[in-house]
Image: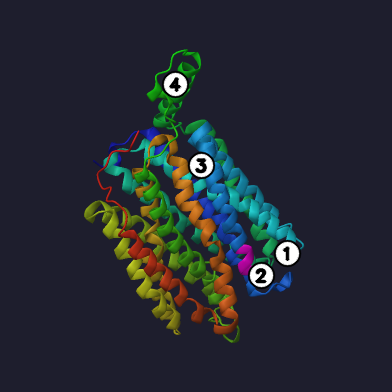
Amino acid sequence: MLFADVTSAQRRTLIAAALGWALDAFDVMLYAMVVAYVMRDLHINKATIGFLNTLTLLASGIGGLLFGWIADRVGRTRALMLSIATYSVCSFASGLSTSVQMLAAFRFFLGLGMGGEWNTGATLVAETWPTALRAKAIAVVQSSWAWGYAAAALVAGFVLQHFHNWRYVFFLGIAPALIILWIRSSVPESAMWEQQNASGRKKISESQNSRAIRPEEHTSPTALPRTHVRNALVLLLLNFFGLFAWWGLFTWIPPYLSLPVEQGGRGLSQLNTTTFLVFLNLAGMFPGYISFGFVADRIGRRPAFFIYLFAAAVAVPIYALARQPWEILVLGAVVAFFGTGFFTGSGIVGAELFPTRIRARALGLTYNGARMLSSIAPYVIGALSLHRGLSGAFPVCAVSFLLAAFTALLLPETRGKELLR
């Protein structure tokens, strides 16, 4: 089956989820692009900057659970629109900050929307696309993060070079709110969710009207089999290790490239930093995300996870040793390819492991719950860098990638499975 065979409605759901995730990346990563300027103007050290990132990630875990519940209750598209509105408005508001406390508050609420977008978009695509194309479609959604990250680097680089004001960068974060109007008018709700929702309402109505309920009907409809609980815990743990490594590494790469050598950076100019980050995203992250869907369909979800995560664990320490610009460029793309590509698998496997009535919440728990648990990563790397420099702190991320690789071996294989109703 080819992408050309899908319906226009399915394409619109894919575009909506991909745009939402790309613009999520755009708003979130604008912060990483202006870190050096914020540190200077608000007199913040690296540990505090790391703590602000930690706060955002902590909120994203809460947001994932909150919006997962919203998506399971009121629908995938409504939850998607609300999450986009939340992170767009809060990104704009970040530019109004005059103190660390104000910035912390806005980044916290931005994190709520950031966490909600991923599981609602991934769930919408998983429920509307055919089984044969599900992994590839989710790979397309996940890959859009690289485009959003690259766009953030380009926009921030242009604004900082010409206007020298980090606040203007945040003000542009309101732009993603415009796509809400298109989603509202053009993107259909998941038919699978609508059927499940209608069935649930019918069962509740029948239960309320029935005077004689058999004993076996007292079983709670929300009770979960032990296999679901076990799978959720394994996927949560895998995502925790992977996200700890990712956020610990990639939130610090922009300042790592631009900070002076005496401060533990590589001393690149703003133009070179922007160029390196765009290359890292388009030559590393984007093909990494896309390729995982094809590899997972070819050899299975579990071995694909292991290969990507193990390769990332090996590549990170080598990248930390790089000194020449061409080495930093090439090795950065390799780290980005394997160290971000595996995230595609989280949406694929999460959708295939859990039934419709809890799918959005399960993805919210296993992915955004892991983001909440891993929220300490930017602070840990920032704090370690005060003594070892960023290159000396990055190997901690390699260890976390390695733990994620071996945790992946505990997952059941789901290649070719129909979604659970």
Q: Position of residue 207 (x, y in %)?
A: 47, 19
Foreground disc of the pair 3, 4: 4
Residue extent of the magenta highlight: 49-53
- Identity, as a three-letter code, of the amino acid under mark 1: Val
Magenta run includes residue 167: no
Foreground disc of the pair 4, 2: 4
As helix, strand or loop, the secondary structure at mark 2 comes to helix
Q: Which disc, if any, is residue 203?
A: 4
Q: Position of residue 189 (x, y in %)?
A: 46, 31
Q: Residues within 10 Å of mark 4 (few under 14, many from 20)?
A: few
The reply to whether residue 55 is visible in this rendering is yes
Q: Which disc, if any, is residue 68?
A: 3
Q: Residues within 10 Å of mark 2 (few under 14, many from 20)?
A: some
Q: Mark 1 or mark 2: name the one nearer the start of the chain.
A: 2
Dominant secondary structure (helix, strand or loop) of the stretch shown in magenta = helix
- Identity, as a three-letter code, of the amino acid under mark 2: Thr
Q: Position of residue 336 (x, y in %)?
A: 41, 67
Q: Which residue is mark 2?
A: 48
Q: Disc 4 versus disc 2: distance between alpha carbons? A: 51 Å
